[in-house]
Image (tube, rainbow, N blue to C red):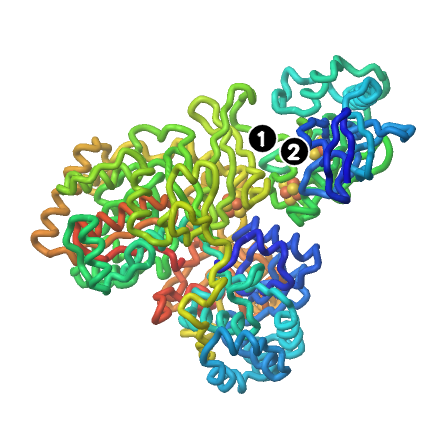
Amino acid sequence: MTNSISEIRNTDAMFVIGSNTTENHPIIGAVMKQAKKRGAKLIVADPRRIELAEYADVFLQLKPGTNIALLNGLMNVIIENGLQNDEYIKNRTENYEELKEIVKDYTPEKVAEICGVKAEDIVNAAIIYAQADKAGIYYTMGVTQHSTGTNAVMSISNLALLCGNVGVESAGVNPLRGQNNVQGACDMGGLPGDLPGYQKVFKPEVIQKFEDAWGAKLSGKVGATIGEMFEGIEKDEIKFLYIMGENPVVSDPDTNHVKKVLSHADFVVVQDIFMNETAEFADVILPAAAFAEKDGTFSNTERRVQRVRKAVNPPGDAKADWEILMNIMNRMGYDKNYANPSEIMDEIASLTPSYGGINYDRLENESIQWPCLDENHPGTKYLHEKAIARGRGLFMPVDYVVSAEMPSEEYPLIMTTGRILYHYHTRTMTGREDGLNQLAPESFVEINPATANRLSILDGERVRLVSRRGEVETTARITEIIDDGVVFMPFHFAEGSANYLTNTVKDEIAKIPELKVAAVRVEKI
Amino acid sequence: MQVTINGKNYDVEKNTTILKACKDAGIEIPTLCHDDRLSPSGACRLCLVEVEGWKNLHTSCTAICKDNMVIQTHSDKVIKGRQEVLDLLISNHPLECLTCEKSGACKLQDYCYEYGITEGTYRWEMKKPYFDSSNPFYNFDSRKCILCGLCVRVCDELQGTSAIGFENRGFETNVATPFNEGLINSTCVSCGNCVSVCPVGALEPKSKEKFRYWETRDVRTTCSYCGVGCQMDLVVKGNKVVDVKPAFDALNEGLLCVKGKFSYNFLSHPDRLKRPMVKKDGVFVETSWEEAYNLIVNKMKSVKEYYGSEAFAGLTSARCTNEENYLFQKMFRAVLGTNNVDHCARL
Ligand code: SF4
Ligand code: SF4
Ligand code: SF4
């Protein structure tokens, strides 16, 4: 997030797109509802009539995969009506003319047709967003998990720049990160092209810096993404796979393929707190401590670094992940020893400018939002206050293209996936909570009454979903939440898993799979 | 503006409630229905104070300071007034402190102790009890409810769900879901924010463990589920987490969702992995750390020798700590010599 959660309380307008906030980020959802009560406007764009839609001033129930068309349409209305922030555009942005040129064609009527929404709603939404003094955009995987996800993110940033909402309190461009420490995993260099703090592996001076600090020879070649790792394993180029705290068999697209890859790998190490679907394929399983059994830090979606503290001992011989990793490194002849995670944080701070001023003494009494450059730096509530990070904000206009897989005669419905409130990711934790299982016991598929009627499917009936990649059986839930022609499945459940159906086609830049759009058919059993 | 509280002068801002002025001055006023985050209600009447020139005692949470106001917070008259309020409350409250889970963390119990109330002096018929145990995570017991309204206001003003309200009138007033259909059939999302604010044992988590609050210690930590990063206190008895309380001085301002509040039992679930395991002839057998490490390290060495660094790949974890993610990528880069590190940020 460029901005902070607490800033939502004082915003004038919220534009929530591709985020079921009250279920996936419940406390942010609650803060949004508080803001609405205080008079902020709310625009919601989602293929499902989610809870926030009930509170929205404008709700756009768009077809999955049409975000870019909608965003361009909003910008079209804003520019046609002269509602853009000219002063801001002149002083703080570049490339406005090109944006104008591209969005010119996206008239409300044309976009209404593509997205399956009303033209007047597009106009109303544009006016609300543009006329608000401070307006924030909030989005999640509903925007990014498409073959055109990166472009959609650029589109969002274009819209924010157009109305002068970047570098402003209670506004901004705010991706809500899903997992507790996905922000931190990225910050710490858990990416093939990035060392900690997004320092690029292909830059010789970066490699030099880390070689000096770590006393080891490093590779300057950008590594493999998950998808490329799987390809590498299939081609016998990658032999050794180490998986820490992930369950790709359930969470990754095209489950059948993932299973094939894992059984093909020469040697697999899985380090986790429970046996799971992925660990079945391991050669060695290492028992890890859970969050309440170790010290450390997580970085939340608003870049806030907060302490995790040990409350109880891990069960049996389980050990904290950092200890296990250190032991293996030591046995591999790398002698560095850490007495505790605080010492690791000191090393992180010494090599990662944005974490430069973060240490456990400070974190004892406060939480710190990075960038935090040195020990006297208070941290950063919202980004780009003085100027856009790269100097000026660059408009990067993009055209709408259709999703990789569109409905066909054989697969006439669009399936989209997501999370629900009562479970978390692949349910290794929440699936062991009786109360949550009572509230959400099993996999299901949401189907609109009209769609269900055509297929003569009744509420609660077992159905089979088939895509080009696989098939699953699940239970039908007939509901108006979802539009005719679209079905929704949560991906949490290993049994009746949505990811037997999903598409592995990826966004070319971010390599994010298109989990939000797959063509399927639904059959009665 | 100036006010005098218990004979001392204090500067206060305009529109400050007497309760806030006292709090800022470091003077404790008992409250059962007050919460800084919520609109004031004056329902419990325990925060009574005496103001010079006013005939009756006043609830300090709703009265606004005026210039040169002279306030008494602990005069005999005030103490008597509060004792009367507590007496009324306890007269209509089952004295089940011996078995009540809330004992030790109950504000009514604490104030009765402070103000010397042993049992209610009003003998009247108890109102008709109403129980709701339909929610999997918490119970409601109307007999213990003091109608402070905190749960109703939290659910409405902060959680924004408005699943519960006051039903019936007068003596028979109850907190309930519309039409008394039961929590499980209501719009309740089981966030437990009502449970966290209930000052008494009327809303109680369904604990798997028997514990007394005085046997526990609180450990402040970060929720391990979603990216919001709510702060919370794990309530620990011995080596077990038995309850979770939201942190107030943090970004979540005293709120949690169903996962953060109630889903902690996985920690002590019997399925937890407890020993390293290796696959032998297709089945996993337990082994020692020593053997597991040796196996991994030998394999690492031979793969590196025969196939080179690019034959390694690692998935690090959006669930683990920063320090662990840092070490994971460091192991791949500095020890194994490859940048083949990724995680499911994209999923
Ligand atoms: S659990 Fe949450 S939603 Fe349910 S009644 Fe309590 S505050 Fe309201
Ligand atoms: S249930 Fe608890 S919080 Fe709600 S009104 Fe009764 S005493 Fe107050
Ligand atoms: S309590 Fe709920 S909203 Fe808060 S971090 Fe945990 S899962 Fe997220």
Quarter residue B152 falls in: top right
Which residue is label 2 attached to?
B133
- Circles 1 and 2: CB atoms closer than 8 Å: yes
Give whichever of B302, A306 is nearer the camera: A306
Q: Are discs 1 and 2 both within one chain? A: yes
Q: What is the chain letter for disc 1?
A: B
Q: Is the residue marked by circle 1 packed among few (<14), some (14-19), or many (20+) residues within 10 Å?
A: some
Quarter residue A514 falls in: bottom left
Give whichever of A15, A486 is nearer the camera: A15
Q: Please name the amino acid that badge 1 sits on.
A: Lys
Name the residue: 67% across, 42% down. B37
Of the image marks 1 and 2, the number of the one nearer the N terminus: 2
Residue B170 % position (x, y): 86, 33
Q: Is the residue marked by circle 2 packed among few (<14), some (14-19), or many (20+) residues within 10 Å?
A: some
Which residue is label 1 attached to?
B206
Compared with B156, A314 (above or below) is above
Residue A221 % position (x, y): 20, 63
Q: Please name the amino acid that badge 2 sits on.
A: Ser
